[in-house]
Amino acid sequence: MADRGSRLKVGWWVLPLVAPLIIALDQLTKHLVVSRLGLYESWVPVPALAKVLEIHYVTNTGVAFGLFQKGGFVFRLLPVLIAAAILYYYSTLSSGQWLIRVALSMQMAGALGNLIDRLRIGHVIDFVHVPYWPVFNVADSAITTGTVLLVLLMLRDEWRERRTPQVEEGAGGVGESASSG
């Protein structure tokens, strides 16, 4: 029980803080785009950046980057399953893994932000357009950033594991090197 209590004391707050903030930002930005632009209409918020960033209102019935259009029920069920898996994994983390908690919170918030659109209006609202990249939104950014962060953390842990010399178990007990001297 002490382990469960320590998880609740340290780091438990990341998900209930980060996820609602991202979902709120996602829904607010989508609302602003829909209320100010017509479908397929564009706006350049910073004229000096016109060649690298514009707001371009489009809809998406597929998943990330417009893949698998017309997924229907599957794209409503998948975020729920993802959220459930994230909640389970989140609950198993030790208290020192707050960056993993942030990454998972971002992924869950992104999945739920887009799910809200699908349930409310039947498609996802996308609006951030940069050259040579499909139009995306805050939820997509959260999913991508959370995934990249999680991959980087996993690579870091693997790198540390490979660099740490393996300690031999010897006559001196676990954690001590056997010496013949």
Image (cartoon, rainbow, N blue to C red):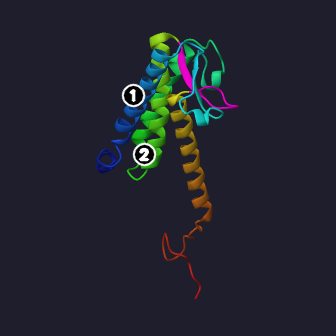
Quarter the C terminus occupies: bottom right
Q: Secondary structure at mark 2?
A: loop
150 and 56: which is toward the camera: 56
Q: Position of residue 87 (x, y in %)?
A: 42, 34
Instruction: Name the residue at 49% across, 77% down.
Output: 172
Disc 2 residue crowd, few under 14, some 14–19, many 20+, Cα 10 Å: some
- In magenta, the rendered stretch is 123-136
Instruction: Name the residue at 47% across, 17% down.
Output: 36
Left of 30 or right of it: where is 7? left
2 and 141: which is toward the camera: 141
Residue 134 found in image quarter: top right
The reply to whether the magenta stretch includes residue 127 is yes
Q: Which mark is residue 24?
A: 1
The answer to the question of whether label 1 and label 2 lie on touching residues, with beta carbons closer than 8 A, is: no
In this picture, is 102 found above or below 66? below
For the residues marked 1 and 2, what is the alpha-carbon distance in whole angstroms? 26 Å
Amino acid type, label 2: Leu
Residue at the front extreme of this rendering: 47
Q: Position of residue 123 (x, y in %)?
A: 54, 14
48 and 146: which is toward the camera: 48
Q: Which mark is residue 170?
A: none
Amino acid type, label 1: Ala
Q: Which mark is residue 93?
A: 2
Disc 1 residue crowd, few under 14, some 14–19, many 20+, Cα 10 Å: some
Instruction: Name the residue at 31% across, 44% down.
Output: 8
